[in-house]
Image: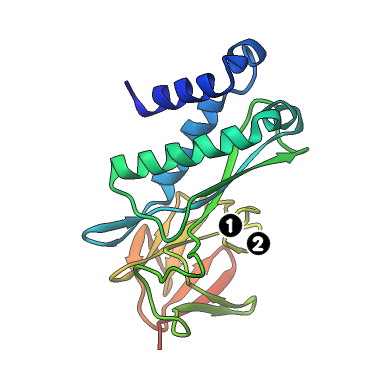
Amino acid sequence: MGLLDRFEQRVDRAVNGAFAKAFKSELQPVEIAAALTNEMDSRAAVVSRARTVVPNVYTVIVSTQDYDRLSVYDETLVGEFAVMIRDYAQQQQYSFLGSVTVALQPSEDSAQGTVEIISEARVDQDVAPAAGPPAGSAPRLEGKLGTFQLTRAVTRIGRGGDADIRIDDPGVSRHHAEIRIGSDVILRDLGSTNGTYVNGTLIAEQPLRDGAVITIGSTNLTFRSAI
């Protein structure tokens, strides 16, 4: 029996089969569970040969109609989602920087039956980071928009509202590029429309060195390594 099948059975038992009756043609919890595992896979960051870090804080955004139905079982659902996330991480040999939390959030802009996941790798206050630069010496990006500290295992850059570094530039894709911090700092293009450039050269993926100029759309950002 697969991970999602086990999840679905646990949820069904927890609410005495209520979902089978009330959600026959509506958004199913197992669809959200699948979206969560996809988010984990897409945000997985290899920080060493033996360690791959995934986000531990998840916000599940659904339509107001779906939220009204799901929120009746909010406590049960978020608990089961968290269990499923930990089970999947163990199965895939992923690691977390802190405790796993899941929250449901309604959005009037979301279409009924759709799911959007926003996630981040957040370190608990009483847990030291397992990898990455020491506090106060994080690498960063500098430009006209300001200075952005690169403190996460994976930092997404784009025009979308869920980007870690949001750039309001028509030449920038919603999910344009990402920076992964491990033994090297790696910049990777995410299939953007206009491409990602380092020192004027179009790249798909490239390690960053101090002083490298990243061009995304018409925006330039200079990479500064930890000091």
Mark before the other along the chain sequence, 2 or 1: 1
Percent coordinates x, y for residue 210 in the rendering: 38, 83
Report the quarter where the N terminus lies.
top left
Does residue 38 appear anywhere in the picture?
Answer: no
Q: Residue at x 65, y 18 (%)?
A: 26
The residue closer to the viewer here, 136 or 77, is 77
Residue at 66 percent across and 57 percent down: it is 170
Q: Position of residue 106 (x, y in %)?
A: 72, 39
Of the residues shown, which amino acid type is indicated by label 2? Asp
Pointer 2 local density, CA inside 10 Å: few below 14, some 14–19, many at least 20 = some
Q: Quadrant of residue 18?
A: top right
Nearer the observer: mark 2 or 1; the answer is 1
State the residue lying farthest toward the bottom. Answer: 227
Say which residue label 1 marks: 163
Q: Nearer the viewer, residue 46 or 206?
A: 46
Residue holding disc 2: 169
Choose between 93 and 139: the one closer to the eye. Answer: 93
What is the spatial separation of the Cα atoms under label 2 and label 1, in whole angstroms? 13 Å
Label 2 SS: loop
Above or below, comparing residue 116 to residue 99 in the picture: above
At 28% across and 47% down in the image, what residue appears?
A: 93
- The local crowd at label 1, few if under 14, some if 14 to 19, many if 20 or more residues have their Cα within 10 Å, is some
